[in-house]
Image: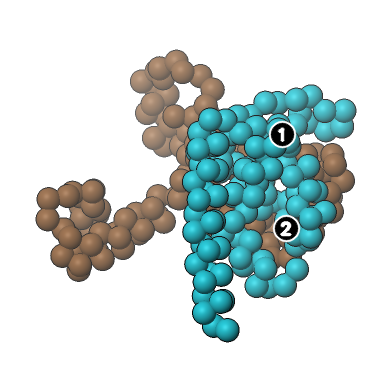
Amino acid sequence: MAAGSNEPKSRYLQYLEIVTGSLEDKKRYRQYKARIKRLPANYRTAVEALERYLMHFGPADGAGAMAMYEDLADLFEQSAADGTPIRDVFGEDPVEFVEAFMANYPAGQYRARERNRFTSAVARAAGEDAGEDTAGEDRTVR
Amino acid sequence: MGKQATEMLKGTLEGIVLAILSDRPAYGYEITAWLREQGFSDIAEGTVYALLVRVEQRGLVDVEKVPSEKGPPRKVYSLNARGREYLEEFWRTWSFLAERLEQLREGGK
């Protein structure tokens, strides 16, 4: 699960988190938001635009997404401290940067599922289905 | 830097960064600054950072956090044994590619 404590969770907490999502992740996300708030205004504006993009296309869930946000905060705190201009951080094509960055983290459930489904559909069409069952989990999702 | 150069750089940037790190440890900002000095003017700091996160995740570099006068501690990256192996493979691939392309150019004359 999330970085931080390795203690087993109480049954109560396990049930609670089914309803609320991981509390540890929520805490990490709040900490990330606080770090972003402390950035100079123009960095903050750029990061918030980046967040919007990530909400649509990035990993949406769990510890993977939290690691991504924390790495982002590291980058922008460092850039702000160095006085690196916004354009130099993002480059001429900000989409290229954000896509390269996002590729480092596990795709969100929705994207991962669709990628697996697509990959196994092509494998089946190519007649490579026999024996291997890497796509097994996928066929159960209908 | 033209569009063609940018496109070609994309496929080789990882090898370039590892080659820089094989010379000496460095942090992200130093690597970007060096690339710009060498004429790769369009390179984005963020792109280099994304690449460093990737090579760290894949265990090709070791990372040490060094306190900094301004701002948060800096992550200093150095090439480890696995990274060295990977870099050797990169140079072999590069030689193959460069050789074949040169042949193609000679043939076209």
For the point 40% across and 17% down, the residue is A8
Q: Residue at x 32, y 55 (%)?
A: A116
Q: Quadrant of residue A78?
A: top right
- Let me know if marks 1 and 2 both belong to one chain: yes
Q: Position of residue A107 (x, y in %)?
A: 45, 50
Q: Which chain is brown?
A: A
Judge left or right: residue A37 versus residue B86. Answer: right
Q: Amino acid at mark 1?
A: Arg
For the point 65% across and 37% down, which residue is it? Answer: B22
Hey, which quadrant is residue B79 in on the image? top right
Q: Which mark is residue A48?
A: none
Under circle 1, the secondary element is loop
Q: Chain of mark 2?
A: B
Q: Which corner quadrant holds the N terminus of chain A?
A: top left
Rendered cyan, the chain in question is B
Give whichever of B39, B64 is nearer the camera.
B39
Query: Label 1 belongs to which residue?
Result: B24
CA gap between label 1 and label 2 equals: 21 Å
Dot 1: few (<14), some (14–19), or many (≥20) neighbours within 10 Å?
few
Name the residue carrying label 2: B43
Q: Secondary structure at mark 2?
A: loop
Residue B17 % position (x, y):
65, 46
Q: Is residue A118 above or below residue A67?
A: below
